[in-house]
Image (cartoon, grey):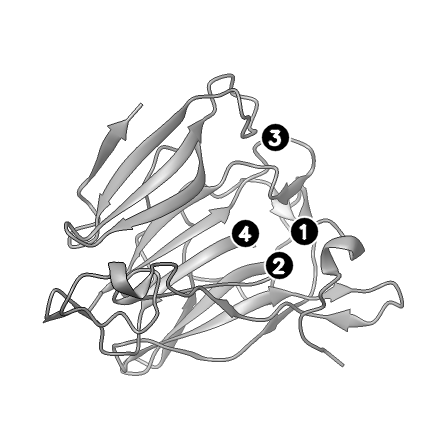
Amino acid sequence: MIFSHCSEHNKLEEKGFAVQNTSESYNDEAPAHRAAGLAMADTVPFITQPRNVLLTTNTAHRLVPVYKVNYDRQQQPFTGENAFHGNAWDIADIPANNQWNDHFIPGFEAMSGYNLVNVSHFNHQLKTENRFFEQAVLIKTLYYPAFSKDTLNGKPLQRNFYMISAYDEDTNKDGFINTKDLRRLYYFDINAQNPTPLIPKNCSVMSSEYDPANDMMYVFAKIDKNNNGKMEYEEATQIFWIDLNNPANTGLQYK
């Protein structure tokens, strides 16, 4: 029996999973592509389970989060559950003529979950399924086009891409992919393909902010100056900007 999120899961096992230098895949199916920056080492095989269907604004595109199956002290299996990110803004501070439907970023739903290791994409027009990542990664946040009718400054928003922040490589070489590694941020097109890093691979995402006046996302990240694959307090913090109208348009705002 698979049951939902346990409040004590952080005490049961370290978040993440082991890696090994073998050709054995973690999953029973080989997805269509490999994301840029994905670790060459495969993950030690483990069981995964899908959870719920996420509705996007485009009716042809549906997503399914894929979770690693974990075991508690009594060796009972459990998986994480979907947690959706709400709007942290004070309602009085949201610009007039805006309907964000409680989203952190208008037009995007943002979700996460304990040991979320992949996301499945299904195209109802083509009747095809593919995974965002070829191998298991540890996903921190998935941003996907919201099903609700969001507006920004009185104009409707319809996003046509995805973003995922994830730990996708054993950067500190400790044998695990977990939250001690560098966290990357990727762009995917509407078909969950063509992954592109939105910040340099030698940086690790810390947090982000939204600028509604310019429809931009500001990403705070530590640069791994000593190349040890860890995010350390002493290392410099940089701020990158991402134009959410055209995510190919990015740059460095502060270094």
Q: Which residue is mark 2?
A: 115
Q: Report the residue at 56% width, 54% height from top.
A: 136
Residue type of the residue flagged with mark 3: Asn
The residue mark sitting in front, 3 or 1, is 1
- Residue at disc 4, secondary structure: loop
Cα distance between the residues tagged 2 and 1: 6 Å
Task: Tell me: residue 118, above or below residue 178.
Answer: below
Quadrant placement of the C terminus = top left
In the rendered image, residue 222, in percent from the top left (x then y), is placed at 44, 29
Q: Are marks 2 and 1 in contact (CB under 8 Å)?
A: yes
Cα distance between the residues tagged 3 and 4: 15 Å
Rendered image: mark on residue 137: 4
Do we see residue 232 in this rendering?
yes
Q: Are marks 4 and 1 in contact (CB under 8 Å)?
A: no
Q: Which residue is mark 1?
A: 15
Do we see residue 191 in this rendering?
no
Crowding near the residue tagged with mark 3, few <14, some 14–19, many ≥20 C-alpha atoms within 10 Å: some
Residue type of the residue flagged with mark 2: Asn
Quadrant placement of the N terminus = bottom right
Residue type of the residue flagged with mark 4: Val
Q: Which residue is mark 3?
A: 172
Cα distance between the residues tagged 2 and 3: 19 Å
